[in-house]
């Protein structure tokens, strides 16, 4: 059981907390600043529940936070305070506390915070070089971004650093590289994690509706507006708004968004008043350099959104990550399709590494799901993945040639199975239509 240190000088409160937590954790107790430090050194708890009013000092816990983090920078400290000063809790978080609660504490919420703190602490602990555990970035309690490649380790490090700030972020990367997962990870590790994460695909909402969806509207603003409606920005209050495919947003609406980013004020469609919304905005686009490549994003909006930019690498540049991700997805498919012995053959691993993955992780997931259902035994072969290794030639070719051979063979099979219907081919493969057309042109494939 994980260990929780309760630091509380009120005997009754400390006893109540101990009884509430002891069934889920090993509980250690302290009743003063000195006994807190001694118990911390002695027991090395996973989480500290720290009263801020120790030793009759209203904000005495702030100094203890500094001491605990000096002893172990990975410590997770949950502050509990009866002080009515509204800045004390946020100040504790700035000093390094994981979370804070006002008294009286809701025990269920406290348990959730403790569990969340333990999970994040486990992710942050340095792994010995001999460890076989894959580096990962937790997105919520059950979802991870996985990667052992150097490029992904850098992405994970940037996400953690950005989570400690409130700057606007622009995430770029090809379709299927995990831009929404990246945005969710930033939100989940930030102080906004207890509030909503609201994603909106700017290319999926009709142009005549996107303004009212984003900003809301008042009753009578247009035909069918029978009552006031909250917009997506308002629904993300205190949390994070993801604007996916920001380049698809109409230019006139980009002006309104820019105004909101500057003053955090919104006006509902048909309304006459402004209201304030505390929302962090993260944007995403499949264009790597949207300010320079003729993108439809306004330059002034781009520079406002990209206070920090994360460029997600395509799957083909992540080396052995491909196999690690594939094995993780197969583990999910074992449970999903009730096939407990499902696994990749060594030939399949070679085929996965040789293929260029134009549809990135989304394409990999689609192929593995299909193969998990259709493979004739528990071993997934390249043929099940529609990445058949050619056995007709004994000639050894270099990696680039092998990859292009696999890609061309896959495209020809895909076009054949979809009877030349590009929309159907895009649906089957998880590759966007523009990317498919580019690939078909590259390999001079006849439709």
Image (cartoon, helix red, strand yellow):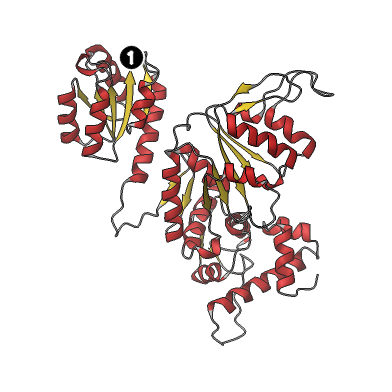
Give coordinates of residue 202: x percent, y percent: 69, 42
Q: Is residue 386 left or right of residue 7?
A: right
Q: Quadrant of the rendered structure where residue 34 is?
A: top left
Q: What residue appears at the point 41 percent right and 29 percent down from the top-left corner? A: 112
Say few, some or many: other residues with alpha carbon within 10 Å of mark 1 (under 14 / 14 to 19 / 20 or more).
some
Pick the front one: 387 or 219: 219
Q: Is residue 393 above or below residue 6?
A: below
Whether residue 27 appears in this view of the structure is no
Of the pair 21 and 187, the residue shown nearer to us = 187
Dividing the picture into quadrants, the one containing residue 39 is top left
Please indicate whether residue 240 sits to the left or right of residue 56 in the image. right
- Would residue 23 be visible to someone looking at this image? yes
Q: Which quarter of the rendering shows the N terminus?
A: top left
Residue at figure coordinates x 76%, y 73% from the top left: 445
- The image position of residue 417, as x and y in percent, is 75, 65
Work out whether 390 lies above or below 294. below
Instruction: Please give the name of the residue rendered at 34% of the width and 43% of the height, measured from the top-left corner.
Output: 122
Drawn side of residue 209 relative to residue 55, left or right: right
Q: What is the secondary structure assignment of the residue under circle 1?
A: loop
Q: Where is residue 168 in the image (x, y as percent from the top left)?
A: 53, 40
Q: Looking at the picture, does residue 265 appear above or below residue 350?
A: above
Residue 135: image location, x then y, percent? 40, 53
Q: Quadrant of residue 422?
A: bottom right
Question: At 35% from the left edge and 26% from the top edge, which residue is drawn?
Answer: 91
Give the position of the C terminus as an image quadrant. Answer: bottom right
């Amino acid at each position: 059981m994980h260990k929780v240190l309760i630091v509380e000088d009120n005997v009754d409160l400390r006893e109540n907390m101990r009884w509430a937590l002891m069934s889920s954790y090993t509980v250690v107790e302290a009743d003063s600043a000195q006994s807190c430090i001694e118990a911390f050194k002695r027991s090395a708890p996973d989480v500290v529940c720290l009263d801020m009013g120790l030793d009759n000092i209203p904000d005495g816990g702030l100094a203890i936070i500094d001491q605990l983090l000096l002893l172990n920078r990975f410590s997770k400290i949950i502050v509990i305070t009866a002080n009515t000063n509204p800045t004390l809790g946020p100040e504790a978080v700035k000093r390094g506390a994981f979370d804070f609660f006002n008294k009286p504490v809701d025990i269920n919420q406290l348990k959730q915070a403790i569990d969340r703190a333990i999970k994040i602490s486990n992710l942050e602990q340095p792994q010995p070089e001999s460890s076989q555990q894959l580096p990962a970035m937790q997105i919520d309690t059950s979802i991870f971004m996985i990667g052992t490649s150097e490029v992904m380790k850098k992405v994970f490090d940037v996400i953690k650093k950005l989570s400690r700030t409130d700057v606007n972020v622009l995430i770029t990367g090809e379709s299927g590289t995990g831009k929404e997962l990246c945005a969710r990870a930033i939100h989940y590790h930030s102080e906004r994690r207890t509030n909503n994460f609201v994603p909106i695909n700017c290319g999926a909402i009709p142009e005549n509706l996107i303004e009212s969806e984003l900003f809301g509207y008042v009753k009578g603003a247009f035909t069918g507006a029978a009552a006031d409606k909250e917009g997506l920005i308002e629904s993300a209050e205190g949390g994070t708004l993801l604007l996916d495919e920001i380049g698809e947003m109409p230019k006139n609406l980009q002006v309104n968004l820019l105004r909101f980013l500057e003053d955090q004020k919104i006006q509902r469609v048909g309304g006459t008043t402004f209201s304030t919304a505390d929302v962090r905005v993260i944007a995403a686009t499949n264009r790597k350099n949207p300010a320079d490549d003729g993108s439809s994003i306004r330059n002034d909006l781009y520079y406002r959104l990209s206070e920090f930019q994360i460029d997600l690498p395509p799957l083909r540049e992540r080396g052995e990550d491909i196999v690690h991700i594939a094995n993780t997805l197969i583990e999910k498919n074992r449970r999903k399709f009730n096939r407990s012995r499902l696994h990749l053959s060594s030939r399949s691993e070679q085929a996965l590494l040789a293929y260029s993955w134009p549809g990135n992780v989304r394409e990999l997931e689609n192929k593995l799901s299909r193969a998990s259902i259709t493979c004739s035994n528990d071993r997934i072969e390249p043929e099940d993945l529609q990445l058949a290794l050619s056995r007709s030639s004994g000639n050894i070719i270099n990696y680039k040639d092998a990859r292009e051979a696999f890609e061309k063979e896959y495209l020809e099979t895909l076009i054949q199975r979809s009877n030349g219907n590009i929309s159907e081919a895009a649906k089957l493969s998880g590759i966007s239509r523009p990317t498919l057309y580019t690939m078909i042109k590259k390999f001079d494939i006849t439709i």
